[in-house]
Amino acid sequence: MAGLTLDNARELLESWARSTSWRRRGLAQKLEITSFDEKSAYTVRLETHVEARRIADHHRPYLGRPLDGPGDKPEEAADSELSLPTAEVKHPGDFVADIQDFAVPHTEVVRPCDQCKSTGRETCQSCRGEGLATCTTCWGRGQTTRDGTSSSCHDCNGSGKSRCSYCDGGGGVKCTACLGHLKLVHFDQLIVHFQSRTDERVIGETALPSSLVGHASTTTAYHEEGPRLEPIAGHGGGGPFRGSHGRVNHQVNAAVNELIEGERLADGEKIIKQRLSVESLPVYEATYRWGNGLRHCWIYGHGLTVHAPDYPVSRLRITGTVVAAMALLAATYGKFVGLY
Ligand SMILES: [Zn+2]
Ligand SMILES: [Zn+2]
Ligand SMILES: [Zn+2]
């Protein structure tokens, strides 16, 4: 909507006033407008796709198969980095979150199972080792009722307890770590975590509330993506932006640099891609004289929305509505009086 004229603005203001209940009609054409400027607002958004790698201790039951231990590492691969299965890491797609894990070669070591102290068994969690569960026929009451007559539960002989089905009444189950094999193979696992995060800033010289700016329809004024974006020195405002033909508000470049420089990486994280977008929202700001003061109103967005919070109201229209409401009350009251 490049080039909204003052006359267009007056027309929009008038039709907006006519769509409201109280705002004064027939005023927009006569208002003394002291300034009328384009003050576009921008939303600057930086998305960062990061990858973090860490090594975790993992284990599986030891079934007696030959191991791939530290002694099996070839001499030339003394550097632990060389043996990481980095070639197997798959890129999940731009800005897609994902977690992948891989066993690290030459790290297998056998140790006794800690979880069961090498007994192969552990306490049944369902019955806490008692071997008994609540009878599901009488729900622990020991009694069942049929046709109003109570009798001892025949499934549990009145005890309210039945044999625990998880441990078959023994109170113990096979160790869930070693599955009864008493030993575990410990090995390093490479965990690769992909995450995407977004940071944004809303910029505008206008006093239009940022809550309105955030909800209005915008257009993309600039888009850039790359392995890692770098801050670029500003051009004093209005010039070509980051080498493109786009022109932006002079504060936009500062905000973009701030977002790029503010991207903090956690330990083990690295950036794999960044995406920058600048969305513009056309905003026209008018200042008009009313009484002894100056007031502002705005026309913004591609839908040409009018925001004029302190536009003059019509006392005549308010009075008219109040009189109508009182007349309605009087009529209603009168009707009641007539009835009773
Ligand atoms: Zn029972
Ligand atoms: Zn049990
Ligand atoms: Zn175990």
Image (tube, helix red, strand yellow):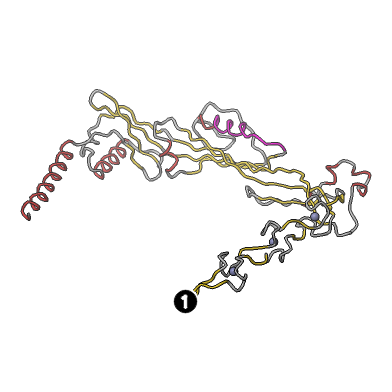
On the image, the x and y values in percent for residue 84 come to 82, 46
- Please give the range of residues in magenta: 253-267
Q: What percent of the width, then of the height, locates residue 243? A: 59, 35
Is 266 part of what is drawn in magenta? yes
Residue under label 1, please give it. 147
Quadrant the N terminus occupies = top left
Q: Nearer the viewer, residue 333 or 149?
A: 149
Q: What residue type is labelled 1?
A: Asp
The outermost residue toward the top is: 292
Label 1: which secondary element:
loop
Give the main secondary structure of the magenta stretch.
helix
Q: Quadrant of ligand 1?
A: bottom right
Percent x, y of residue 264 = 64, 34
55 horizontally vs 334: left or right: right
Q: How crowded is mark 1: few (under 14 residues within 10 Å), some or many (20 or more)?
A: few
From the viewer's side, name the closer residue of 225 and 5.
225
Q: Does the magenta stretch include residue 93?
A: no
Residue 8, position in %: x, y? 31, 40
